[in-house]
Image (cartoon, helix red, strand yellow):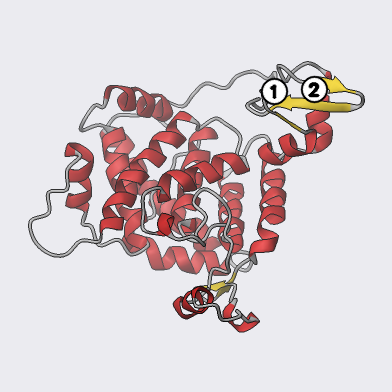
């Protein structure tokens, strides 16, 4: 069996090393043992659940899990898969229509009779369906680096990006987010890459350089998990900080919005879908967070009202 250290376990789940040692000492991590003064923890060990009164799973999460298991068509699971996947991908430039997204989900076939379609749009659509399944299954699991990286792995597996040597699928970025195509070609052709090639910027917003991502993500997750019961403002603050770090080479927006959906489910908050119509308000909210938080909050509350109308239609309490 493979074992990891206390430090590795703490980093994996975004907790302090002291907490990890306490879990080991109290026997809460199965299979952990001491060698001298060093704890050895099984690599597949899970984070112990705190012994608190277990909160009732929300009716929405219960319904999503039931309909996912039965593959029921026409319910809230079916509608959420199509609407969230279509809108989140469309924000990032996918040209698939809502009907084409629905057709892929319902039939597992393409069904496109005319026009040119990017293969990556199709692959990432199918992958996004799997991402949503993953967060439904793991909704109540604490956020961790491994969970977030798994979402990225699911989203980008099989895409053209995954064939590029410099693109890390399921891991943090190796190059600056603003790395240009000219810089990629220069690197491939053997030219020495200068600082001018390395622009840590996306959409006019400065992002974290690759060498700082692990530390900043560890701190972000630790700060977030320190709060036992999250409210919408904390989920939005996490999202903004995540997007400012921009930990992955690509797919940050979609992974970030999936995390928001998951955390709403985990904390009994009605989730929401940022539609294409709300895109510009959403981007403004991201830019202005910390100055005028109301921009992003109001946008997400509007999206939340739209999702509530679906819950009302399907007679799901919230």
Observer-nearest of 291 and 32? 32
Badge 2 crowding class, 10 Å Cα cut-off, few under 14, some 14 to 19, many 20 or more, is many
- Mark 1 sits on what residue? 50
Q: Is residue 234 visible?
A: yes
Q: Earlier in the sequence, mark 2 or mark 1?
A: 2
**Quadrant including the N terminus:** top right
Residue at the far right in the pictured view: 36
- Where residue 51 sits: x, y (%)? 70, 18
Q: Which mark is residue 181?
A: none
**Residue shown at 26%/57% (left/top)?**
119
**Residue shown at 54%/45% (left/top)?**
149
Badge 1 crowding class, 10 Å Cα cut-off, few under 14, some 14 to 19, many 20 or more, is few
- SS state under label 1: loop
- Where residue 61 sits: x, y (%)? 42, 29
Between the residue at mark 2 and the residue at mark 1, the CA separation in whole angstroms equals 14 Å
- Where residue 140 sits: x, y (%)? 54, 30
In the displayed structure, does residue 163 sit left or right of residue 12? left
Residue 15, by quadrant, is: top right
Residue 115, by quadrant, is: bottom left
Observer-nearest of 241 and 165? 165
**Quadrant including the C terminus:** top left
Which-is-in-front pick, marks 2 and 1?
A: 2
Above-or-below relation of 65 to 92: above
**Residue shown at 52%/21% (left/top)?**
56
- Mark 2 sits on what residue? 24
- Where residue 176 sits: x, y (%)? 58, 69
Above-or-below relation of 168 to 182: above
- SS state under label 2: helix
Residue at the far front in the pictured view: 190
**Residue shown at 55%/44% (left/top)?**
148
In the displayed structure, does residue 164 sit left or right of residue 119? right
């Amino acid at each position: 069996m493979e074992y990891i250290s206390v430090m590795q376990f703490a980093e994996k789940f975004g907790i302090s090393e002291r907490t990890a040692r306490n879990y080991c000492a109290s026997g809460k991590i199965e299979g952990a043992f001491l060698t001298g003064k060093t704890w050895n923890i099984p690599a597949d060990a899970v984070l112990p659940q705190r012994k608190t009164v277990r909160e009732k799973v929300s009716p929405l999460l219960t319904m999503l899990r039931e309909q996912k298991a039965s593959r029921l068509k026409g319910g809230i699971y079916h509608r959420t898969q199509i609407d969230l996947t279509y809108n989140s991908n469309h924000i990032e430039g996918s040209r698939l229509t809502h009907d084409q997204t629905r057709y892929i989900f319902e039939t597992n076939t393409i069904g496109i009779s005319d026009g040119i379609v990017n293969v990556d749009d199709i692959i990432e659509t199918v992958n996004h369906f799997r991402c949503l399944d993953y967060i439904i299954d793991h909704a109540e699991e604490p956020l961790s680096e491994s969970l977030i990286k798994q979402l990225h792995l699911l989203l980008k597996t099989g895409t053209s990006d995954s064939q590029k040597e410099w693109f890390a699928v399921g891991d943090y970025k190796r190059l600056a987010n603003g790395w240009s195509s000219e810089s990629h070609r220069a690197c491939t052709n053997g030219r020495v890459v200068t600082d001018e090639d390395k622009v840590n910027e996306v959409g006019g917003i400065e992002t974290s350089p690759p060498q700082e991502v692990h530390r900043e993500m560890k701190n972000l997750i630790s700060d977030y998990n320190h709060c036992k019961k999250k409210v919408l403002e904390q989920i939005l603050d996490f999202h903004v900080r995540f997007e400012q770090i921009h930990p992955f080479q690509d797919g940050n927006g979609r992974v970030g919005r999936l995390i928001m959906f998951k955390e709403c489910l985990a904390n009994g908050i009605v989730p929401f879908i940022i539609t294409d119509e709300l895109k510009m308000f959403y981007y403004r909210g991201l830019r202005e967070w910390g100055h005028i938080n109301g921009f992003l909050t109001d946008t997400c509350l509007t999206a939340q009202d739209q999702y509530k109308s679906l819950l009302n239609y399907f007679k799901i309490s919230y």
